[in-house]
């Protein structure tokens, strides 16, 4: 006999509960410090895949008529709302753990995650040399155009969108891909007095954006990332006419549909709307994130030979 609905757990919310267990491992102070960073990286990677597969699948259902989904015994809209609430709570816990616990603990060990505003002046010559020799050859600075639906961003790739002004005071927006891969996401600065600075590659770019757009005055930069849905294994998910209805929708597009557009919450509202228009995104695609995306790259956080951290 089937169990009553109130005794059943939705599998997507159960999966998010599993990923929360990964966060709990990252919060466990009995775990070596760098391994705790790795658990954050696992959480981030898992969540990205969850959106590309499960949320994308639910979004496909949302585009169908309600009578086609009624037989599944779920409301895609309600489930997506619940998912977003759980993910928001987890992401806030992620940020508190990283900024409030793990980064201060790393600083106590002599490893300091710096940014474009806290990078010491005596490291600038090293960063300039690294930028010119290793980073600049990989960059292709472009501008954000005006025509709707024409912007193409690579899947699961971080970009910086930067305020620019020409000599006549006309505003522009520059678009710059963060080249990781092929480069490491973190730059290790030369050590001084057993203290070592670490910089996101994003912040190295922020320091050198004027060199990428000569002749322009440079303002703030904001990180963005677009994720598209992965291939859906429909036969494993649904059956009958519902599968064919989704397949028809998939065949009408040339590439994976957007399932999440992460943007820096400090970004001006007008710019967020402009990007939404250029990428032809729905309101549901727009998700405020943080100053940095693709935090699965925490797997590569440098330890600078500190064996006690692992």
Image: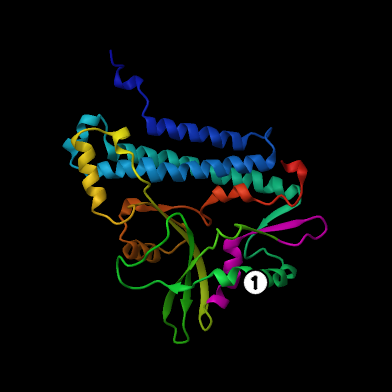
Q: Is residue 209 magenta?
A: yes
Depicted 32 relative to depicted 142: above or below? above
Q: Nearer the viewer, residue 287 or 253?
A: 253
Q: Position of residue 74 (x, y in %)?
A: 27, 32
Which residue is rendered at x = 26% and y = 35% of the image? Answer: 75
- How far from the left and from the top, in percent, is residue 293? 51, 54
Left/right placement of residue 151 relative to residue 182 reads left
The answer to whether residue 84 is above or below residue 24 is below
Image coordinates for residue 244, horizontal then vertical, percent: 21, 41
Q: Is residue 12 visible?
A: yes
> Which span of residues is magenta-colored?
189-212
In which image quadrant can residue 188 be found?
bottom right
**268 relative to 196 in the view: left or right:** left
Quadrant into which the C terminus falls: top right
Front residue of this view, candidates 258 and 172? 258
- x and y, in percent, of residue 120 in the image: 71, 66
Residue at the disc numbered 1: 133
């Amino acid at each position: 006999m089937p169990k009553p609905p109130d005794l059943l757990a939705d599998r997507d919310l159960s999966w998010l509960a599993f990923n929360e267990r990964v966060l709990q491992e990252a919060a466990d102070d009995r775990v070596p410090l760098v391994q705790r960073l790795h658990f954050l990286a696992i959480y981030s990677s898992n969540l990205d895949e969850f959106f590309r597969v499960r949320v994308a699948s639910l979004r496909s259902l949302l585009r169908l008529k309600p009578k086609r989904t009624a037989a599944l015994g779920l409301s895609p809209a309600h489930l997506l709302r619940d998912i977003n609430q759980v993910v928001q709570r987890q992401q806030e816990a992620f940020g508190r753990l990283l900024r409030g616990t793990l980064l201060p603990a790393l600083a106590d060990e002599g490893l300091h995650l710096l940014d474009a505003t806290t990078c010491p002046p005596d490291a600038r010559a090293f960063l300039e040399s690294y930028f010119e020799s290793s980073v600049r050859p990989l960059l292709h600075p472009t501008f954000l155009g005006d025509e709707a639906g024409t912007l193409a961003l690579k899947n699961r790739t971080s970009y910086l969108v930067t305020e620019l002004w020409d000599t006549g005071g006309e505003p522009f927006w520059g678009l710059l891909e963060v080249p990781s891969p092929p480069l490491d996401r973190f730059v290790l600065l030369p050590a001084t007095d057993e203290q070592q600075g670490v910089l996101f590659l994003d912040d190295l770019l922020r320091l050198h954006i004027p060199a990428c757009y000569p002749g322009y005055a440079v303002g703030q930069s904001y990180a963005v990332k677009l994720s598209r849905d992965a291939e859906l294994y429909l036969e494993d998910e649904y059956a009958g006419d519902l599968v064919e209805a989704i397949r028809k929708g998939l065949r009408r597009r040339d590439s994976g549909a957007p399932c999440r557009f992460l943007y820096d919450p400090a970004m001006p509202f007008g710019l967020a709307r402009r990007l939404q228009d250029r990428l032809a995104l729905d309101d549901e695609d727009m998700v405020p994130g943080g100053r940095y995306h693709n935090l699965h790259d925490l797997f590569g956080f440098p330890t600078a030979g500190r064996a006690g951290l692992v």
